[in-house]
Amino acid sequence: MIGGPTASGKSALAADAAERFGGVVVNADSMQLYRDLPILTSWPDEALRARAPHRLYGVLDGAERCSAGRWRAMAMAEIERAQGDGALPILVGGTGLYLRALLEGLAPVPKIPEAVREEVRTLHEQEGSVGLHARLTVRDPEAARRLEPGDSQRVMRAYEVIEATGRSLLAWQEERHDRYTGRAVVLVLEPPRDALYDACNERFEGMMAAGVLDEAARLRKRGLDPRLPVMKAVGVRALLDHLSGVTTLERAIVLGRQATRRYAKRQTTWFRTQMPGQARMPDRYRAESKREFIALVERLLLTR
């Protein structure tokens, strides 16, 4: 498993590792599951995908929702398929919750009634993630302490669980089942913040050059529910605001770059606090560091 923030070089490392060790790359990024935004969600480019088989990229339509449980089932099927072919499964992505769900299993949280989910979504629309986080602090202070106020999806999830069940999501998570029983190695990339932020800025500018605005325009024409996951992909809001005439293109680029940096910061914090004790590399993956990284992967595979 290769995790870490956006723009840390995970996709390139996964492709190089798959080529070196006879592997299959399996996507563990919640947004790259959707076929609508290959540019904005930074799918591996054609050159990387040509180096090794890549699975679970663009397998869902933007009108769908994907849970950690649904992704886990798809990923387990790809892991078994790769192992059946004698290949090494290499899971890669920045959705740490997915990786942890695969390793540690899923919490047996009862199905949340749609009325409760709608109520929480309405509260979020009215008060924002910070306001909802303040409410969560009152209802479930321990869960609130572990979540960033701006992490809207997880704040909403924690709030709807306590609201519907009367129990903290943390209490449910202590009852996880279906833990992964195979051998797994987790490598987390932790680039220095300045280098990571520079890479985030460059990435968004590269997206603009690659035609991300046209991609956003096609998504806008679909008229999807703005509460769907694909509509909350990093940078979507700024681009759609520009296409709607709310803001200038220059402002949209500034906001898109800012959103990417903030997302990278949240991911870094999550991997540091929620997946402790794993192998870590305090650097971005680049062509000039390939030998060092591949040597580390090889040592991990040999010693775990």
Image (cartoon, rainbow, N blue to C red):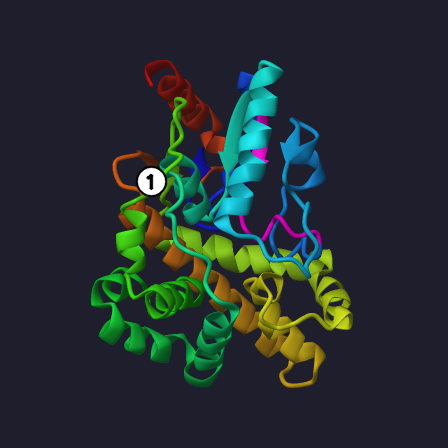
For the residue marked with disc 1, what is the amino acid? Pro
Which of the 4 image quarters holds residue 46? top right
Picture quarter containing residue 223? bottom right
Image coordinates for residue 167, horizontal then vertical, percent: 28, 62
Residue marked by disc 1? 282
Q: Give whichever of 5, 156 is nearer the camera.
A: 156
* Residue 276 left/right relative to 284: left
Q: Is residue 247 above or below residue 37?
A: below
Question: Residue 247: x percent and y percent?
Answer: 62, 83
Left of 135 or right of it: where is 71? right
- Residue 265 versus residue 119: which sits nearer the camera? 119
Residue at horizontal 43 percent and vertical 49 percent from the top: 5
Res 23 visible: no
Residue at 51% x, 34% y is 91
Q: How many marks?
A: 1
- Which secondary structure class fits the magenta region best? loop
Residue found at x 37% / y 47%: 107
Q: Nearer the viewer, residue 221 or 166?
A: 166
Range of residues picked out in magenta: 23-35
Quadrant position of the N terminus in the picture: top left
